[in-house]
Image (cartoon, rainbow, N blue to C red):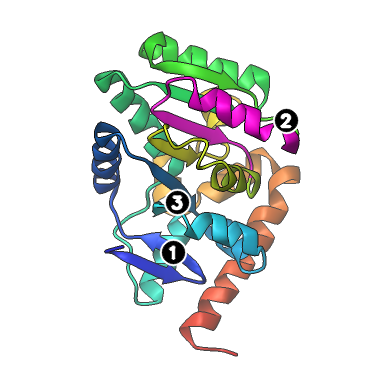
Amino acid sequence: MMNRINILNSYIDNFSMDETLFKIENVINEGTQIHHVVVNAGKIVSMQKDLQLRESVNSCDLINADGQAVVWASKFLGKPIKERVAGIDLMEKLVVLAYNNNYKIFFLGAKEDVVAKVVSAYSKQYSSNIIAGYRNGYFKKEEETDIALQIAQSGAHILFVAISSPTKENFLYENKELLKNVNFIMGVGGSFDVVAGKVKRAPNWMQKSGLEWFYRLIQEPKRMWKRYLVGNSKFIFLVFKERFSIK
C-alpha cells in the first residue's frame, strides 16, 4: 500500500485524519470493507513477542498511529508520520458521518451499563437511527461466532469494538470473513468509557504534548501503571535500539 511504513515490526499508514475519513467513506459508499486498527507505543511493544497480535494488526487494511510517541518515533527513525489519528477522535467523527449519511453502527464491548450509556448518549445527541445494535464485551471464546453473526445480520455499516488488546484485534482478525458485510470494522479500546463519562479524557494541551498517557495513569494508577511506565520505557529502548542499530 502507498504511504505504508514499518516501525518496529508494525505497519503504519501515513494518513492524516481527513485522508483516513475520506478513505473510509469511499469504502462504505462502494459497499466494500476496511479492517482498521490503531497502534500506540504499548501495542507495538506487545507485538515484538506476541506474533498472533502482530499478524492481526499487520493484516489490517488501514493502520493509524494512535499515540504521540509513535509519531515522534517515526520522525526520529526518519520515517515521519503526518499526524496522530487517535482512535477515539476517529470514532466520534465516524458517528457524525453515520448521522449525516444514514449509516448504522454496532457497538461491541465494555460492561453492559457502559455500552448502554454510549448508545443512549449518541441516540440523544444524534439519532437512534444510527444504532444497529449493541452488546457488552464479556463473552466466552466459543460465543464469538454467534456474536459475529449477530453483528453481520444487524445491518451495520460500522462496527466499533471496545475490548482490551489483544482480544479485540484477534476477534476482528479471526471473524473478518463473517463480518464481510460490515463495511468498516475497528477496535476502539477504552473509548466507550470516555463517552459514557466513566473516564475523563486529557485536556487538549496534554494530548498534543504526548502526555495523555500520564493523565490516564493518574486516574487509574493500579490498572495502568504497568502498561504506561513499563511499556513506554520498553518502547523508548526499542526506538533507540532501532535508530542506532544496536544488536
Q: Classify residue 57 as left or right of residue 19.
A: right
Which residue is rendered at x = 24% and y = 32% of the image? 29
Q: Which mark is residue 66?
A: 3
Res 155 → quadrant: top left
Rendered view: 127 above or below 115: above
Q: CA distance from mark 3 to mark 1?
A: 13 Å
Which residue is rendered at x = 49% and y = 27% of the image? 152
Res 175 → quadrant: top right
Tell me the residue that label 2 is attached to. Answer: 139
Q: What kind of residue is marked 1?
A: Tyr
Q: Is residue 109 visible?
A: no
- Disc with the residue nearer the chain's start (3 vs 1): 1
Which residue is rendered at x = 29% and y = 59% of the image? 82
Q: Classify residue 6 as left or right of residue 171.
A: left
Q: Is residue 183 visible?
A: yes
Q: Secondary structure at mark 2?
A: loop
* Neighbourhood count class around disc 3 (C-alpha, 10 Å): few under 14, some 14–19, many 20 upward: many
Q: Quadrant of the C terminus?
A: bottom right
The magenta span reads: 141-164
Q: What kind of residue is marked 3?
A: Asp
> In the depicted view, which residue is nearer to us: 166 or 156?
156
Camera-side mark, 3 or 1: 1
- Residue 46, position as x, y percentages in the image: 63, 61
Tell me the residue that label 1 is attached to. Answer: 11
Q: CA distance from mark 2 to mark 1?
A: 30 Å
